[in-house]
Amino acid sequence: MKRTIRNLTLLVLPFLMMIIVNEISRQKNPDEPYSKHNITAINSAKRNTVKCTWICHNDTGFCKQNHVTYLSSYFQYTDPIYFGAINLLKSTGNYGLANIVFLVIIVPLLLWFFLVKSMNMQDEISTLKRRK
């Protein structure tokens, strides 16, 4: 029972924290939000050199030029992975849905599954060590 509560907490807590942070950010954001297909984002779509906005999603080059400072020397390594993932999601024919399915549902569930497996193994190792 204790393990089940721990595992469910590890599954739900990150999503809950993300929702809380997003809703707090939404209230404090003075800019007009970006809206497309009757879906409203938190950030605006205006170009802003001080902070990332929705334009950084639509124009990665603008974001890299204005907001990335420390990792710019690694673009040769990260760009193929980043743009490969973007192109893979676009190749499904429905980028938005693919983004939600893969990056919001499948990847977090896989990470959660492996974390739970790892913690269960660690529990078993600890139990075996105590028996000695």
Image (tube, helix red, strand yellow):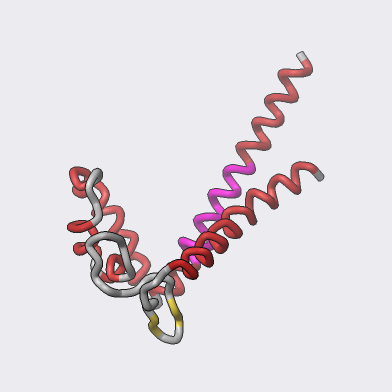
Towards the viewer: 8 or 35 = 35
Q: Residue at x 64, y 37 (%)?
A: 119
Residue 67, given in percent of the width and then of the height, sits at 24, 55
Where does residue 53 sit, x and y in percent of width and height?
32, 67
Q: Which residues are magenta?
A: 101-116
Q: Quadrant of the C terminus?
A: top right
Q: Nearer the viewer, residue 38 or 89?
A: 38
> Magenta includes 93?
no
**Would residue 28 be found to the left or right of residue 65 on screen?**
right
Please identify the residue farthest to the bottom as the structure is shown.
38
Question: Is 91 positioned to the left or the right of 75 in the image?
Answer: right
- The residue lying at 44 percent from left, 79 percent from top is 40
Q: Residue 103 or 36: which is nearer the viewer?
A: 36
State the residue at coordinates (43%, 71%): 42
Q: How many marks?
A: 0
Judge whether residue 107 is colored magenta: yes
Nearest to the observer: residue 97 or residue 29: 29
Q: Is residue 122 above or below residue 84?
A: above
Residue 59 percent coordinates (x, y): 24, 68
Q: Where's the N terminus, which quadrant? A: top right
Give residue 98's quadrant in the image. bottom left
Q: Residue furthest right?
A: 1
Residue 122, horizontal then vertical, whole percent: 65, 30
Of helix, strand and loop, which mostly describes the magenta segment? helix
Q: Is residue 129 above or below residue 19?
A: above
Q: Which residue is drawn at the image coordinates 71% and 45% (left, top)?
A: 6
